[in-house]
Amino acid sequence: MSKNELDKAALDLLAVRAMIEELQAEAEALTDKIKGAMIDQGAEVLEGDGWKASWKNVNSSRFDSKAFKAAHGDLYTEYTKPVTTCRFLISA
């Protein structure tokens, strides 16, 4: 890949990431609008032409690794392992 092609790819990537950020903010604002309507109507489910939205409480269980480490530090250490990852960063 030539330097010009690489420059273009990097700048395109930065532009696409900026667009994604804007779209995520827009999606969040639209989600909040729909949730607001659900609150106003006291509804967990709303439907329209070609869409259905639900907003309900869901129970789940999550492992509390901090509490486990505090209570069983030896086991925590025994079952943790170092992991190497590769991180890609780009900035303007």
Image: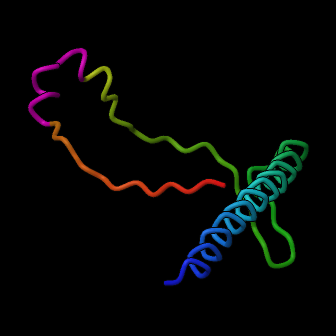
Q: Please identify the quarter of the rendering in which residue 68 is found.
A: top left
> Quarter holding the C terminus?
bottom right
Which of 78/63 is in front? 78
Q: What stretch is highlighted in magenta?
A: 69-79
Magenta-span inclusion, residue 72:
yes
Which of 30/81 is in front? 81
Residue at 86% x, 45% y is: 36
Name the side, left or right, on which 20 lies relative to 87.
right
Q: Please identify the quarter of the rendering in which residue 5 is found.
A: bottom right
Q: Where is residue 8 in the image (x, y as percent from the top left)?
A: 65, 76
Residue at 11% x, 27% y is: 75
Name the side, left or right, on which 1 lies relative to 19.
left
Magenta-span inclusion, residue 53:
no
Q: Where is residue 2 in the image (x, y as percent from the top left)?
A: 53, 83
- Give the residue at the far front of this rendering: 3
Q: Across the whole image, how many numbered discs are drawn on residues?
A: 0
Q: Please identify the dominant SS of the magenta region.
A: helix
Q: Please identify the quarter of the rendering in which residue 20 is found.
A: bottom right
Q: Where is residue 61 in the image (x, y as percent from the top left)?
A: 39, 38
Give the color scheme: rainbow, by chain, secondary structure or one colour. rainbow
Which of 81/61 is in front? 81
Q: Position of residue 80 (x, y in %)?
A: 17, 36
- Give the residue at the far top of this rendering: 71
Image: 30 above or below 19: above
Image: 86 above or below 8: above
Residue at 32% x, 23% y is: 66
